[in-house]
């Protein structure tokens, strides 16, 4: 039985066997399982948040738990804290934009990473701390007003629901902003709705006029 030429194409059975064979894992590479895909998606989602915005949201969240004149139900406190934190995120974005406009210095990757670590440590400390302080303040206000005391688990719900609502509000606002940005970008390229006239038409007409004048001369 003679062997075929060295440059012959592989048989269909050989190619099918090669495709069905499992790929060998690369040393040091993590398997692309559902768990790692979920972690990668979470990391990309968190990376889209602004560091000054998150700092402003954390500061405003802590301020929202300060004592009030009247006691609040846990769900009202959660909604108010979430709205306040979302406003703080917007204030942090504005402050960061002003600093970038006024100061020409730009932090490097190591400085940004240190800022993220410091903010994460501050969040881990301040969020539960002000949750406990807010619960104590609400207890004192309820005692002064003669109101009944809610279960302790309600104050844990305040922190969890506040985080979820704040993330939802910021995500919706980012989606609206990106939609507006894409609409403005398309408005500079495509004709405006209902007009049929492109903003680039005057420039194209001027170029056509120049080329015609050159041909005539």
Image (cartoon, rainbow, N blue to C red):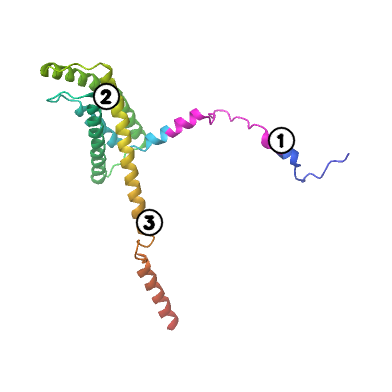
Q: CA distance from mark 1 to mark 2?
A: 57 Å
Q: Which mark is residue 186?
A: 3
Quarter of the N terminus within the rendering: top right
Question: What is the quadrant of residue 200 in the picture?
Answer: bottom left
Q: Secondary structure at mark 3?
A: helix
Residue at point 75% right, 45% down? 9
Crowding at dot 1, Cα within 10 Å, few <14 / some 14-19 / many 20+, comes out as few
The numbered mark, 1 or 3, whose residue comes first in the sequence reads 1
- The magenta segment is 16-41
Q: Secondary structure at mark 2?
A: helix
Q: CA distance from mark 2 to mark 3?
A: 42 Å
Whole-percent x, y for residue 15 in the image: 71, 40
What residue did someone put label 2 on? Answer: 158
Taking depth in this image into account, of 86 and 157 the one nearest to the observer is 157
What residue did someone put label 1 on? Answer: 17
The numbered mark, 2 or 3, whose residue comes first in the sequence reads 2
Quarter of the C terminus within the rendering: bottom left
| Side (left or right) of 16 relative to 123 | right
Q: Is residue 68 above or below residue 3?
A: above
Q: Is residue 35 magenta?
A: yes
Question: What is the quadrant of residue 195 in the picture?
Answer: bottom left
Crowding at dot 3, Cα within 10 Å, few <14 / some 14-19 / many 20+, comes out as few
Q: Is residue 37 magenta?
A: yes
Residue at point 39% right, 76% down? 210
Q: In the displayed image of the protein, which residue is found farthest to the right?
A: 1
């Amino acid at each position: 039985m003679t062997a075929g030429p060295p440059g012959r194409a592989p048989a269909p059975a050989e190619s099918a066997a090669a495709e069905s064979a499992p790929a060998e894992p690369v040393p040091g590479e993590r398997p692309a399982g559902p768990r790692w895909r979920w972690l990668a998606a979470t990391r990309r989602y968190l990376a889209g948040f602004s560091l000054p915005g998150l700092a402003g949201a954390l500061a405003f969240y802590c301020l929202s738990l300060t004592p009030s004149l009247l006691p609040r139900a846990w769900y009202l406190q959660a909604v108010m804290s979430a709205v306040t934190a979302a406003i703080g995120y917007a204030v942090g974005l504005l402050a960061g934009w002003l600093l970038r406009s006024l100061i020409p210095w730009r932090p490097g990757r190591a400085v940004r990473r240190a800022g993220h670590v410091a903010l994460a440590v501050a969040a881990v400390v301040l969020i539960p701390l002000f949750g406990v302080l807010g619960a104590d303040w609400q207890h004192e206000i309820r005692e002064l007003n003669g109101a009944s005391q809610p279960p302790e688990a309600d104050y844990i719900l305040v922190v969890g629901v506040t985080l979820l609502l704040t993330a939802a509000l910021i995500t919706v606002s980012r989606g609206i902003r990106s939609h507006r940005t894409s609409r403005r970008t398309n408005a500079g390229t495509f004709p405006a709705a209902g007009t049929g006239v492109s903003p680039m038409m005057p420039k194209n007409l001027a170029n056509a006029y120049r080329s015609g004048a050159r041909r005539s001369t």
